[in-house]
Image (tube, rainbow, N blue to C red):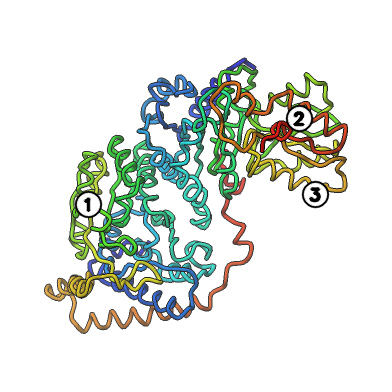
Amino acid sequence: MQRRLDVQENEIARYERMVEIREVEEQIFELFAAGEVRGTTHLCQGQEALAVGLASILRPTDAVLATYRGHGIALALGLTPHVVLAEVMGKAIGCCGGVGGSMHMCDMSLGLLPTSTIVGAGIPIAAGTALAFQTQGVDSVGVSVFGDGTTNIGAFHEGLNLAAIWKLPVVFICDNNVYGEYSRIEVTTPIEDLHMRAESYKMPHFALDGMDVEAVRKGVTQAVDRARTGGGPTLIEAKTYRFAGHSRADQGLYRPEGELEEWRKRDPITVTEESLLARGLLTPEKIADIKAEMKRGIQEVIATCNAAAEPTVAAMFENIWTPPKESHA
Amino acid sequence: MSVLRFRQAISTALADEMRADSSVMIFGEDIAAAEGPFKTSEGLLKEFGPLRVRDTPISEMAFTGAAVGAAIMGMKPVVEIMFMEFLGVALDQLVTEAAKMRYLSNGTLSVPMVVRASCGAGVGFGSQHSQTLVNWVAATPGLKVVCPSDAQSAYSLIRAAIQDPDPVMVLEPRALYAERGEVDTGLKIEIGAARILRRGSEITVVSLGQMVNICRSAIEAFEIDAELIDLATIVPWDRKAVLESVKKTGRLVVVEEAPESGGWGSEILATVTAQLFHQLKGAPFRITTPDVPVPFNGALEARFIPTAEDIARQLAHAIKTGESPKSWWSLEGFK
């Protein structure tokens, strides 16, 4: 919970969290590349500002639905690198006990519902969390974060429509990182500004600069405030860029030459560094220290996770149904 | 004890649960103002208001998913899928989301939601509105599946499903909605408990949904000494009740309203055969529908669903010879 408070209260902490997410993702890439972790993974380098900006505005009682590209949001919301990396490595101390893997992050105490691998699935579920809040008369909000490709699946349209007619306290955030899996957005989608799709649902909508954590905070605040005060749902389009490929096997070779380099100039970590340096809140030396310390710290976490216990066979049979003693019946 | 139609037993169960627990809410297509296309939510909007009783757009994926989210956040939503086939467009939310959420949360959440769907043949709705599709939902760990066969079990199973902490699918045989039956609102039927409706010693008949009454007619009209078990819950099914019965009778038939291939009855046969092989007096067998879509024509649809006469023929054959009887369609030269 302290990790959550940090990003809420302190912009240096927000910067450090973005650096942490970047370092965790880079190290996960290395672990997979070295064949030390099985399965697949979906990394979010370039999208740290959205994760951290969002987490800094939400309360732990809000409900967040995110996707298989979810390490950044999990860390931003306050999960520790230990439980995230341990889950990626399938260890018992992972946030899902090691039975979930890279694509499944969860911590109910921080408002992160299990992340889903199904494109669009979180949208109706987030609407449902908001339905609960509305019916219960509490001022929590539901949030669904999803990629640009999701705007072409039925769940997006059904979910937005339902949220609009019931005026649900929910915020839909499209993380437009330009690519849906291996395909560039314009190949799959006839419009450039995806937030415009909310027009058909008479829902407020806008785009924001997803590479700038402060811009994210400003936009998310507006939408979350609307939801909390009975104003209904909002669709936000955060313009970001996926520095990594879609998944483990993808090197992103289909990208036009120079595109990645162009976006890297607006790397969310660089953008924040420039702002903090300009205002004298950080020095180049301090930045170098933060990064070196983060590298060292994550290496320690990886060593701990490497040594951590595997789940027992019993874990395979647990948590499928609720044990009778927990039943409300 | 009162006499209710099957559909009234459902709306009574919903109302009783909503009175007992303010977190119970229901939503679906035309269930509020119109009180349900099959009148299974009569009086609910009036009594509980539009916050807890909601009409939805024709968006099964959205409202089934909304039930998942609402359930995780402390509500007990009951959603209605008008025809079981419509679950096809929402299956992800039930099978891949609802049923996996507890597992993927390391046991830190539960999803106490109920999905009700009308299903089955017999009322002339044709091939896309008459399937039972039990096997769509029966092979998903994390999901419970029940199917009432009369007004009493409709009432008791709906209440048990709402009280259950996990996602429960309730398959409601559409042909039974207007049927009357006695209902004791104090009677509980646990999920996972079969109902032994008739004692007998020559053969165990396991059935489900609208086939239960048809089996009873066959047994009574043809005076067969059969033990009739209404399985009531398909997941998790009552192995103990079925095995105990077959130990006594030595014979088993499962009567299903589902195509022969891939039916839930194969699961029952497999378990009984594996566990009681040496105690069997004859080969366990299944009575099913043929592997065809449900035909619209009334005479054809009446043949599609196993009839009491044909069930009686097959039971008598099995008891007399110990051999599996042939299906009517193979006797008539169809595949």
Q: Earlier in the sequence, mark 3 or mark 2?
A: 2
The percent coordinates of residue A6 (x first, y second) are 30, 65
Q: Quadrant of residue B263?
A: top right
Which residue in the rendered view is the most extreme toward the front? B333
Amino acid bearing label 1 = Pro
Are the residues under badges 3 and 1 in a single subunit? no
- Of the pair B54 and B87, the residue shown nearer to us: B87
The mark found on residue A190 in the picture is: 1
Image mark count: 3
Image position of B83 (left or right of A21): right
- Of the pair A27 and A260, the residue shown nearer to us: A260
The percent coordinates of residue B335 (x first, y second) are 66, 38
The mark found on residue B275 in the picture is: 3
Q: Is residue A121 above or below residue A229?
A: below
Q: Nearer the viewer, mark 1 or mark 2?
A: 1
Q: Quadrant of residue A192?
A: bottom left
- Of the pair A324 and A42, the residue shown nearer to us: A42
User: Which residue is at 36% across, 68% downward?
Assistant: A43
The percent coordinates of residue B113 (x first, y second) are 50, 40
Are the residues under badges 3 and 2 in a single subunit? yes
Are the residues under badges 1 and 2 in a single subunit? no
Q: Are marks 3 and 2 in contact (CB under 8 Å)?
A: no
3D distance between C-alphas at marks 3 and 1: 60 Å
The mark found on residue B228 in the picture is: 2
